[in-house]
Image: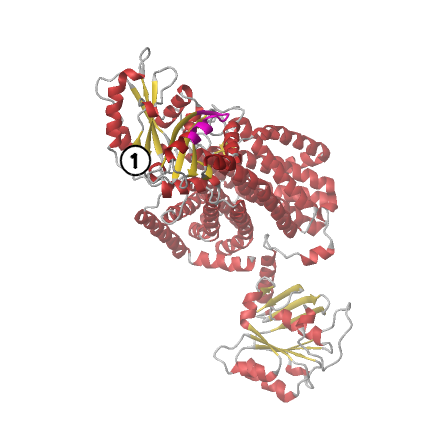
Amino acid sequence: MSSYLYRLGRLVARRAKTVLALWLLLAVLLGALTVSLGGKLQNDFTIPGTESQQGLDALTQRFPEVSGTSAQLVFVAPEGERIDDHRKEIRSVLDEVEKVDHVATVTDPLAPESRTVSENGRDALATVQLDLGVDELPEGVTSDLEKAAELPPGSSLEVHVGGDAYAATGVQVSATEAIGLLIALLVLAITFGSLLAAGLPILTALLGVAIAMAGIFSVAAFTTISATTPTLALMIGLAVGIDYALFVIARHRSQLAHGLGVEESIARAVATAGSAVIFAGVTVIIALCGLVVAGIPFLAVMGYAAAAAVLVAVLVALTAVPALLALAGERLRPKPGSRAARREAVAEGQPHAPTLGARWVRVVTKVPVLTVVVSLLVIAVLAIPARDLALGLNDNGSADPGTAPRETYDLIDRDFGPGYNAPLFVTADIIDTTDPIGVMDSLGTALGGYDGVQKVALATPNRTADLGLVVIYPTTEKSSPETAALVESIRDDAAGLEKRFGIEDVMVTGQTAVAIDVSARLSGAILPFGAVVVGLSLILLMVVFRSIAVPLKATLGYVLSVAASFGVVAAVFEWGWGADLLNVAEVGPVIAFFPIILMGVLFGLAMDYEVFLVSRMREDYVHTGDARRSIETGFAASARVVTAAALIMIGVFAAFVPHGDPIVKPMALGLTVGVLVDAFLVRMTLVPAVLALLGRGAWWLPRWLDRRLPVLDIEGEALVHHLEHADYVAAHGELAVRAREVEVAGALSPLSLELRPGGLGIIHGSDPVARSAALASITGRLGFSGQLVVLDRLLPEEAGAVRARAALVEDVPAALRLAGGRRIPALVAIDSATSLDPGQVAALSALTSRGTTVLLGVPSPPAVPQVAEALVRAEPDRARPALTDHAAPAADLETVR
């Protein structure tokens, strides 16, 4: 992969202005598309297939008058007066409200059949039923309601307007979020020692976020996207966008400090840091898309949208960032004698020099057992409150204090009871009854007798008398376990109620029931999703580090970070610790999808930090074999960039906490704590200590497993070979094939070969499988070990490109037919079962004279071996007996594989 990225980086550097123009054009086009489509966000937290959703669907189809959203009007009489004395004023307000568009019905709180007056006699609650859902209401309807609810001149009453119709359906972003960008800029300026270098990641991250947000709002015109989705994508997109750009720019500046040219440095930075960015981005994307495991549509859409923001951030880091680096040119090169130049020189010469990172790793590995114990104790203390973490869906009770919806909510909660903010709808199919009104009255009376029911507000059939509705107010709030128990109790008794009253399909629905069902489904999805994430982390890290202990340690560290995050969020939102400081509107349950979102995002970030830190340690261990020293050198070389990346993440996430949306606030706090704990306490403290304890055992992997695991080149190892080949070619001339110790287990012993373009090379040997394995490896059709560059493409990383330009045929006539085609392969390999006479060999000049390289595999060399530029013998693997039967199929590659 790094070889492809190297070419991409060089291409972008040469076409910098064109690349940036394309990105800006895309941003403008998406912005225009967003404006023209007018996509609208929604707060649809329903789950198809749940009983509450089935009940809502039945109301929409058969009782449309009550299927829309609703508003609440609370009339309050002055101290010492009764609300009944203001009947005329209330009636005039209700008459005006009834005239507002999309108002279906308005209940009179003083009418005998719908009387809703507080115990103190000062408050009256009227319900305004609209004919559309909150997401479907045209703009201005809620404003019209507020105007219609204005009291007559001279009235001494107070009127408060609230309810579900005032739920937020837009992105709430305050100026506080900009503090995160300022923190990121400060960290970058300190890291790079250059304001120009510090500003580039901010600029590119904003470009990526703008494109992602425009895309989300454009898609919102065609599908349901919750109001929280853009804020989540904005938060994650900003954080990873800055971090990914940081990795590329840091590598570029380091290479410039060592004297590399601008264009070459950009290409190498994209190849090396870009490989790590792709791995990091793909990991986060997989985790976010993995939210689909929960089986909840709105959560899957949130995951897809955030994953799209991460994908854009990766593409920007690989293209727009290098383009800006090319335009900046020499201005980014650290000046000789500058702090940045000295730092790079020290890191190059002695990575364990007295830097803060070097000193820290020595401290934590001096007595590793003590470090492990202290770290675990700190995390355990942070995680203690996690057991009290409660989940639910937000309502106006979590709105900002002082707003009209929040004041109305609090007033109802105080004077009527919390259940009046959490009505339950019970529907029943009454088509078979002959007395629909009487049946509904009886059903209402029966439901009113359940523990936890404060009042039955309504019990009525619809206009066609085929569906009945009972509206009940519980004694507890929406998120209370007692309310969930009441819902469960009615559902458990549904069959008995149906038999008793001769009705069918008794269902509990309404927004309160929806919240209970969503919370239950999400709570049940946490363990399956966690199992997927933990399993994925084990596999990914085992592939990357070729170890068993390192993935186990890394995965356990991730679990500890999640536990600490849950604990701190529970301490703030459930226990109320620091709630006022963090501007928490209401202490209580957090949004139900908080745990699963945090687990997904933090998984990707935790794997990033693990890879950036431990991969350098592994690289040093492979080169030196010194396990203890590799921890110090690897940590010192990578700690500065990882520290900067983590601080940027923390700054961006923390900026969404003080004035964030009530749904986003716990996620922002959890991610802030999660990154803080994972980066500094787990990865930079616990991990070095554990590796020091394990010693060489940390890098042990059974050989049979090592052979079966794929190879991920996230550190640009392929680029090293690519550059080495370029230097070799510069010194020795162009080569079409360059093989060094190429070996195929069970088929071919180590083979070395060099062949120039347009030349003829011969691989001979009595074993047909060995010859076939050699030719198949060189043409990119078979795996091998060793070093192999064909047509300037590094194998096996670029095997696809080699296969596209190389042909493998069975005889000379088939090869000569290729010479007559319109497109002649750059390399033709002939796997012949028999030896060739001089005339057949000479005929191959039809290919070589046109610049095609020919590689011939035969049992024995030709009579005049001088016709071949390269002549090598293919020996079978010593672990397998040689095949000498020339009649056997020479290209039996199935056996080789």
Residue 424, image x, y percentages:
44, 32
Which amino acid is tagged 1?
Ala
Toward the left, the furthest residue is: 153
Q: Quadrant of residue 870?
A: bottom right
Residue 103, image x, y percentages:
29, 35
Q: Observer-nearest residue: 438 or 730?
A: 438
Number of numbered callouts drawn: 1
Residue 346 seen from this side:
no
| Residue occupying the point 70% across, 32% down | 373
Q: Observer-nearest residue: 458 or 635?
A: 458
Q: Is residue 444 magenta?
A: yes
Residue 148, image x, y percentages:
25, 28
For disc 1, the marked residue is 104
Indicate left or right for 128 with 738 as reference. Answer: left
Residue 125, image x, y percentages:
34, 24
Q: Quadrant of residue 549?
A: top right
| Residue occupying the point 42% across, 52% down | 327
Toward the top, the furthest residue is: 80
* Highlighted range, magenta: 442-454
Q: Observer-nearest residue: 784 or 50?
A: 50
Quarter holding the C terminus is: bottom right
Q: Observer-nearest residue: 641 or 588?
A: 588
Q: Quadrant of residue 437?
A: top left
| Residue occupying the point 52% across, 27% down | 482
580 over 80 or under it: above or below: below
Indicate left or right for 864 with 727 as reference. Answer: right
| Residue occupying the point 61% across, 60% down | 721
Q: Is residue 94 magenta?
A: no
Residue 1 seen from this side:
yes
